[in-house]
Image: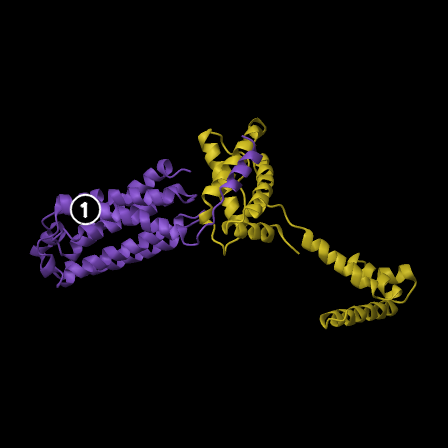
Chain colours: A yellow, B purple
């Protein structure tokens, strides 16, 4: 799964090597992130400055790209430049920052792709479990119901519920083991 | 100008970046500063006439080692602060340790010397001019260091200016030690150290105005 950081960093490394196509993709991507970053931090009266700031930051990214150390996160480097440009803008125009300045994570919104992928994995694994156990596991492990609750709602005894869950998990374990050996 | 046009323009003149380009710029900036400052020393102050004899004595090497150490710490600080988010805390700590250690040594020598020698140990023959001369000699280096930083991306301008000033002052005092005939450690500990710190202060004050990008 590609996170935003990995993607942008790969593009940046290619750009530093002189690949203009990667560079164009990178700049377009970065411009979008920067726009929303600046818009969020400028008060209503100054929202119009966002585009100027985006362009200034892109220019800085270009002229200062030698200062990107390739073993560091790209987004942190970019954020430091964007933040510098924003503060410089505030100073130049004597604007007092009313919105708190921030951390590098704010530039790139949280990346949920991994969590989504995990969910898909769980669903597909559950499909391999016998119907009865699947239902029990789903209710207890994913919806978070207690054994007692599930027992009353299904009409099974508590120990039968536990046995069902146990069997299901064993089946999942077997399936994962099979996958690890390359025949899942 | 629309962002798309800008991106097209930047993409068009894309050139590969060498990994060493920061170090190269640092070497050029400080190298030219060094050459200018050295010429200024030779032309304005002149080499010490007893350089050959002096180079066989401990005080000459002690003075050179002290100023060279500060120069290395300072040049390294310029490189570190040249990057966004760069910090020079480690350099300031190392420098404080060096100043402290040399200060202790100098204080020990001062304390062991007979009281009548104390005044000359501190004021030497060139008290009025030593620090001033170092500050003057460090100016070409300060310009060189500022040039280095202007091509880079320091995000803390006062810190960046201070790093440039300390590097300039320290390299300037290395150069000055080829003119200066003072050898007493207490003298060096006070006046040379000031000659490093004052350019550091000048750099810190000038950084906000001259290092903006």
Q: Quarter of the image containing the C terminus of chain A? A: bottom right
In the figure, A167 relative to B117: above or below? below
Q: Callout 1: 10 Å neighbours few (<14), some, many (20+)?
A: some
Front one among A19 and A175: A19
Task: Provide the secondary structure element on which disc 1 rests.
Answer: helix
Number of on-image labels? 1
In the figure, A49 relative to A161: above or below? above
Left or right: A182 in relation to B150: right
Q: Quadrant of residue B90?
A: bottom left
| Outermost residue to the left | B116
In the figure, A106 relative to A165: above or below? above
Front one among B19 and B171: B19
| Outermost residue to the front | B12
Point out residue B159 in the picture as x, y percentages from the top left corner. 37, 45
Point out residue A106 in the picture as x, y percentages from the top left corner. 58, 44
Point out residue A95 in the picture as x, y percentages from the top left corner. 49, 30
Residue A8 in sight: yes
Residue B201 in sight: no
Q: Which residue is mark 1?
A: B39
> Which residue is found at the position 9% from the left and 49% from the top?
B125
Q: Quadrant of residue A177?
A: bottom right
Q: Quarter of the image containing the N terminus of chain A? A: bottom right
> Which residue is found at the position 84% from the left and 63% from the top?
A134
> What chain is tagged by disc 1?
B
Left or right: A78 in relation to A174: left
In the figure, B81 relative to B100: above or below? above
Left or right: B40 in relation to A48: left
């Amino acid at each position: 799964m590609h996170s935003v950081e990995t993607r942008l960093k790969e593009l940046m490394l290619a750009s530093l090597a002189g690949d203009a196509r990667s560079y164009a993709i990178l700049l377009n991507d970065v411009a979008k992130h920067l726009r929303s970053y600046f818009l969020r931090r400028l008060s209503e009266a100054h929202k119009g400055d966002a585009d100027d700031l985006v362009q200034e930051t892109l220019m800085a990214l270009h002229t200062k790209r030698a200062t990107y150390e390739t073993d560091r996160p790209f987004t942190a480097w970019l954020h430091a430049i964007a933040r510098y440009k924003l503060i410089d803008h505030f100073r130049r125009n004597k604007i007092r920052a009313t919105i708190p300045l921030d951390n590098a994570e704010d530039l790139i919104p949280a990346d949920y792709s991994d969590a989504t992928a995990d969910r898909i994995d769980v669903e597909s694994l559950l499909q391999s479990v016998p119907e009865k156990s699947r239902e029990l596991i789903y209710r207890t492990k994913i919806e978070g119901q207690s054994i007692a609750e599930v027992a009353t709602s299904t009409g099974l005894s508590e120990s039968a519920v536990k046995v069902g869950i146990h069997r299901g998990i064993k089946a999942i374990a077997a399936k994962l083991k099979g996958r690890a050996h390359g025949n899942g | 100008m629309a962002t798309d046009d800008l991106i097209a323009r930047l993409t068009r003149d894309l050139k590969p970046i060498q990994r060493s380009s920061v170090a190269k710029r640092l070497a050029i900036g400080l190298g030219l500063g060094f050459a200018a400052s050295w010429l200024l020393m030779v032309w304005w102050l002149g080499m010490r006439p007893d350089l050959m004899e002096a180079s066989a004595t401990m005080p000459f090497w002690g003075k050179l080692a002290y100023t060279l150490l500060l120069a290395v710490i300072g040049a390294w600080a310029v490189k570190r602060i040249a990057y966004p988010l760069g910090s020079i805390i480690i350099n300031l700590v190392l420098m404080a340790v060096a100043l402290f250690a040399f200060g202790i040594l100098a204080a020990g020598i001062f304390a062991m010397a007979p009281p009548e020698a104390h005044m000359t140990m501190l004021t030497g023959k060139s008290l009025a001019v030593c620090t001033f001369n170092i500050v003057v000699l460090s100016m070409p280096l300060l310009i060189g260091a500022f040039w280095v930083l202007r091509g880079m991306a320091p995000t803390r301008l006062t810190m960046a200016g201070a790093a440039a000033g300390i590097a300039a002052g320290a390299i300037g005092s290395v150069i000055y030690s080829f003119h200066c005939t003072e050898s007493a450690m207490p003298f060096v500990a006070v006046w040379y150290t000031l000659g490093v710190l004052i350019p550091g202060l000048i750099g810190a004050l000038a950084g906000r105005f001259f290092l903006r990008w």
